[in-house]
Image (cartoon, rainbow, N blue to C red):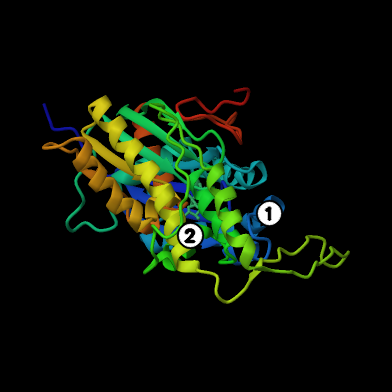
Amino acid sequence: MGRRESRPVNILGIETSCDETSAAVVRDGNRVRSNVVASQVALHRAHGGVVPELAARGHITAIVPVVEAALREAGIARPEIDAVAVTGGPGLAGSLLVGVNVGKTLAYALDKPLIPVNHLEGHIYANWLTLSAVDPPPKPQFPVLCLLVSGGHSELILVEDHGRYRHLGRTRDDAAGEAFDKGARLLGLGYPGGPVIQRAAQGGDPDRFAMPRAWLGESDDFSFSGLKTALLRLVEPYRLPSPTVEATPESPFVVHQPPRYRDDLPVADLAAAYQTAIVEVLAVKTARAARREGARTIALAGGVAANEALRARIAIEAARECAGNPPPVVFPPVSLCTDNAAMIAGAGFWALREGRQGGWEVDVHPRLPLGSANRAND
Ligand code: KG4
Ligand code: ZN
């Protein structure tokens, strides 16, 4: 018997669930051959957050050049694409529609399978990706305890095997990234909040101000809304009056006015206290769940996984909780933590292996839960 031919599998990924237009080519579910991300941050910055209609229109104009660039950078011709993976949800409906339509059209034109991918599954699978063929990081070992923290989600998920998820906990109010974004807005630091708070916190004293931690007993759930209120109380005494700006027919969106403060606002200490409060709860709860579930790897995923304080604290808490035998902690490179299409192509590879491909009925699902099929009437 001859050996089975093992030809590399190239998947084109497309991601448009929020405010990044992205396309990527990934080989065999791990090697990123290209990952092009057109960010709309500048478009939304004036509004202090993502404006759904602007986001959808931004994708419409960006998507084709972004796909072209991803193919060019990967150095492959269209016929070498084996399948098209596209984010079907969760996300903003108008934004998702752009990617799903382009993905469907490409799959149809190329006569290749279309794989609808859950955005959250994509974030998880960023942990299997490698940007370079040299020194690829160790592969996560199942069961993987994944802390998925982004602008819309804070979830603890036990990944028992490829495509098999057990949801352990979720946020009861704000997501961790949302807490960073709201905190940054309150401090007048801009958008997106995570990177600016991380920068502002450098050299700050995290113990100067007391911030609440919502432990919620033994639950694996999270809650971050109390933090915002605590920060609001602390900054209020430093606040200066802001001028109001009304919407006009020429400028129909009310432009976000950042709060203004006296010069002696202790930004570094406040940012450090705020960041530490978020990071501590995430790290302690993740380590506790990892020990309880016998996880062999702890993985971070989502935009907040880019946070350096979180990366460091998780390792400390895992060592404390699982004394003597802590599972390794893995996280994707920063460029693969925030929204990108490489993670969608990566997850698409494993979905294709399990026969989870879609047909022309693939639809968008703004609130698609992890682990459910993407069908028209889900
Ligand atoms: O995964 P992502 O790009 O989009 C969603 O699916 O939501 O995550 C975006 C979130 C934002 O809330 C942003 O503030 C946060 O990730 N973020 C960070 C950092 N970089 C991005 N949060 C903390 N520290 C960072 N370095
Ligand atoms: Zn995301």
Left or right relative to 279: residue 313:
left
Which residue type carries mark 1? Val
Residue count near mark 2 (Cα–Cα under 10 Å), binned few <14, some 14–19, many ≥20: many
Viewport quadrant of the N terminus: top left
Q: Quadrant of residue 48?
A: bottom right
Q: Is residue 150 above or below residue 362?
A: below
Residue 209 point in image, percent of width and height: 46, 57
Residue in the foreground of this view, choosing between 287 and 367: 287
Task: Kindly indicate the quadrant of the structure image that contains residue 202.
Answer: bottom left
Q: Is residue 106 left or right of residue 280?
A: right
Question: At x 19% / y 42%, what residue is drawn?
Answer: 319
In the picture, measured across the screen, residue 183 lies left or right of residue 7, that is: right
Q: Position of residue 143 (x, y in %)?
A: 26, 29
Please give the name of the residue rendered at 54% of the width and 33% of the height, measured from the top-left corner: 172
Q: Is residue 16 left or right of residue 126?
A: right
Residue 34 coordinates in the image, percent (x, y): 38, 58
Closer to us: mark 1 or mark 2? 1
Callout 1 crowding tier (Cα within 10 Å): few <14, some 14–19, many ≥20: some
Q: Secondary structure at mark 1?
A: loop
Of the numbered discs 1 and 2, the one sitting upstream in the chain is 2
Check mark 2 vs ligand 1: CB closer than 8 Å? yes or no: no
Q: Which residue is mark 2?
A: 37
Q: Residue at x 34, y 34 (%)?
A: 350
In the rendered image, the vertical position of residue 107 relative to residue 289, given as above or below = below
Asked which secondary structure carries label 2, the reply is strand
Against 188, residue 117 (above or below) is above
Separation of residues labelled 1 and 2 (CA atoms): 19 Å
**Front-most of 99 and 56?**
56
Residue at image mark 1: 51
| Amino acid type indicated by mark 2 | Val
